[in-house]
Amino acid sequence: MTDPVLSFRAVPGPGFVAGCTVSTWLQTGALAEPVAHVLIGHAPPRRAHEDALSVELGLLGMVDAMRLRPAPERVPHVGDRLIMRGPYVALDYGHPNLVMRLPAPQEWRAHVNTGGPVCLTVALDPIPPGAGPDAVEAHLERVVAIGRAYMGATALRNR
């Protein structure tokens, strides 16, 4: 029997992941419970063997492996994919041997460590390296609006 969750797109390796841009932040508001966010994208193609299509296929390989859904759909729980060891946080992005290290500000780590909700997003359009919070927010709003973002809810593994 075939597993319906198997990906037909390859899960990318370390060379691809090194070109990813990752942002983490804690969204807080007076009326809602805080939510930790992880946004993964990729810098514009810069290596000889990369082009826009190969970058998109790499990101879609991550989307498939983590079972993310298009952003407008209901956000599914995609399993406990975050690993915290001391000051380090990593994401199990579906590769059989590798994880992706995440930037983890103290406030974000504390929220995740106490079991707070985490929203994981993969954006298919390039995110410029070094983009500040306003640029990241505008980018996220745009890719969600045009159907170029995939989301899932995750949590800390082995709490």
Image (cartoon, rainbow, N blue to C red):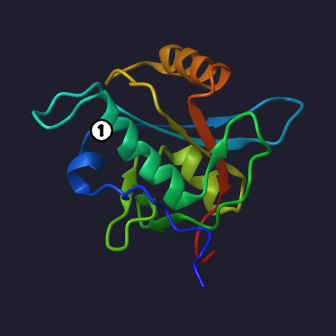
Q: Which residue does the image show at 59% across and 78% down from the upper left?
A: 158
Q: Which residue does the image show at 20% across and 35% down from the upper left?
A: 50
Q: Position of residue 4 (x, y in %)?
A: 62, 70
Q: Quadrant of the C terminus?
A: bottom right
Which of 69/117 is in front?
A: 69
Q: Position of residue 67 (x, y in %)?
A: 60, 58
Q: Is residue 50 above or below residue 127?
A: below
Q: Is residue 119 visible?
A: no
Q: Secondary structure at mark 1?
A: helix
Name the side, left or right, on which 21 lies relative to 116. Answer: left
Which of 148/30 is in front?
A: 148
Q: From this viewpoint, which residue is outermost toward the right? A: 31
Name the side, left or right, on which 52 lies relative to 132. Answer: left
Q: Quadrant of the N terminus?
A: bottom right
Which of 108/68 is in front?
A: 68
Q: Is residue 158 above or below residue 67?
A: below
Crowd class of label 1 (few under 14; some 14 to 19; many from 20; radius 10 Å): few
Q: Position of residue 154 (x, y in %)?
A: 64, 58
Q: Which residue does the image show at 38% across and 66% down from the upper left?
A: 95
Q: From this viewpoint, which residue is outermost toward the front? A: 1
Q: Is residue 138 above or below residue 6?
A: above
Q: Is residue 158 visible?
A: yes
The type of residue carrying mark 1 is Ser
Name the side, left or right, on which 7 lies relative to 118. Answer: left
Which of 67/129 is in front?
A: 67
Name the side, left or right, on which 102 lies relative to 136. Answer: left
Q: Position of residue 105 (x, y in %)?
A: 48, 43
Q: Which residue does the image show at 13% across and 33% down from the upper left?
A: 47
Residue bearing the label numbered 1? 54
Q: Is residue 144 above or below residue 114?
A: above
